[in-house]
Image: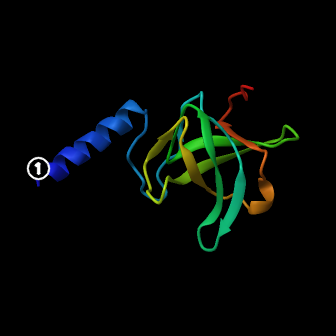
């Protein structure tokens, strides 16, 4: 029991340090994320019954479940969405940091709206080249 309590405390501390809430409840309120977050989209997938997942390596910042983010298309068009889930090596963490290879489940995004070469950024922020 003590080991489980310690693991939970470490997870909560990491989430707090990363600036994330640990609320994965479906329908939870979207939150403004780390303004330095950005990730180049390497690939896209559709998962039946779940939605669109994009993969890539986070270039900068921290990404959390329920963060509001923008898809920045190669044309410059922006589409705002919310992070529904994050996957790293088969695990489903609340957050991921720069350097992490991730899969990101996007709310209400059709696979035709995003493609390899697009960027994910914190909502309303500029893309840092």
Q: Say which residue appears at 54% left-offset and 34% top-offset.
A: 98
Q: Say which residue appears at 42% left-offset and 54% top-offset.
A: 24
| Count of numbered circles on the image | 1
Residue 28, image x and y in percent? 46, 52
Q: Say which residue appears at 77% left-offset and 44% top-offset.
A: 118
Residue 60, image x and y in percent? 59, 31
Most distant residue in the bottom direction: 48
Residue 12, image x and y in percent? 30, 41
Please say if 53 is above or below 120: below
Residue 127, image x and y in percent? 73, 29
**Is 49 positioned to the left or the right of 26 in the image?**
right
Please say if 127 is above or below 87: above
Please say if 55 is above or below 15: below
Secondary structure, mark 1, is: helix
Most distant residue in the left direction: 2
Q: How is the image coloured?
A: rainbow
Q: Check the picture and name the quadrant holding the C terminus.
A: top right
Judge the density around disc 1: few (<14), some (14-19), many (≥20) Cα neighbours within 10 Å: few
Most distant residue in the right direction: 75
Q: Check the picture and name the quadrant holding the N terminus.
A: bottom left
According to the image, label 1 marks what residue?
2
**Is 86 positioned to the left or the right of 114 in the image?**
left
Q: Say which residue appears at 71% left-offset and 49% top-offset.
A: 42
Out of 123 and 27, give the one closest to the viewer: 123
């Amino acid at each position: 029991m003590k080991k489980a309590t310690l693991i939970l405390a470490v997870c909560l501390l990491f989430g707090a340090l990363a600036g994330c809430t640990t609320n994965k409840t479906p329908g939870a309120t979207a939150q403004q994320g780390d303004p330095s977050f950005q990730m180049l989209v390497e690939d896209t997938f559709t998962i039946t019954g779940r939605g669109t997942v994009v993969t890539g390596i986070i270039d900068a910042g921290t990404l959390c479940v329920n963060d509001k983010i923008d898809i920045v298309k190669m044309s410059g068009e922006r589409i705002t969405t919310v992070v529904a889930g994050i996957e790293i090596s088969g695990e489903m963490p609340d957050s991921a940091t720069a350097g992490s290879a991730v899969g990101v489940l996007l709310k209400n995004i059709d696979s035709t709206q995003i493609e390899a070469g697009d960027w994910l950024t914190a909502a309303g922020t500029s893309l840092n080249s």
